[in-house]
Image: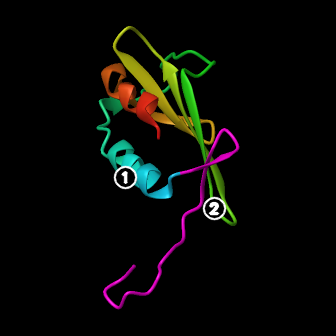
Amino acid sequence: TDEYDQTLYDAKVKKNGEAADAEAFLNWYVQLNRLPMAGKLQQGQAYEETPLYTLYLQTADTRRSISFHSMDALHAALSVDGVAKFYVEKSGLSLLETLP
């Protein structure tokens, strides 16, 4: 809600097709957005094609896929809709396993 107590959005969350706790998901999503980028991918920098994790975020008119692809023992490339520009430390991916 905003400062006038007007609803800005009404989140309805599903996990594996089943209804899930929207507030818990939104809190988790805020943490995911705080995942720091470890660096920018260089053109041609290699990473595994098959992702370690993939999330799908859908609104009324948009669907996004967010995937993490192994690069080496410490790093994972981050792709959004199949385009990878940055990489993160794999240690931060443990957050993905706590998805409510």
Residue 57 in picture, x, y percent from top left: 59, 50
The residue at the far bottom in this view is 4
Residue occupying the point 32% across, 31% down: 39
Image spot of residue 32 (x, y percent): 38, 43
Q: Disc 1 or disc 2, which is closer to the eye?
A: 1
Residues at marks 1 and 2, CA–CA distance in whole angstroms: 17 Å
Q: Residue at x 29, y 38 (%)?
A: 36
Q: Position of residue 5 (x, y in %)?
A: 38, 87
Query: In the rendered view, does 44 fall on the left or right side of 64?
Result: left
Single out the residue that lies furthest toward the top. 73
Tell me the colour scheme of the image. Answer: rainbow
Graded by Cα atoms within 10 Å as few (under 14), some (14 to 19) or many (20 or more), the crowding at tag 1 reads few
Q: Residue at x 44, y 28 (%)?
A: 97
Residue for badge 1: 27
Residue type, label 2: Thr
Left or right of residue 50: residue 85: left
Residue marked by disc 2: 59
Query: Which image quadrant for residue 42?
Result: top left
In the image, 76: left or right of 84? left
The stretch in magenta equals 1-20
On screen, residue 7 above or below 88: below
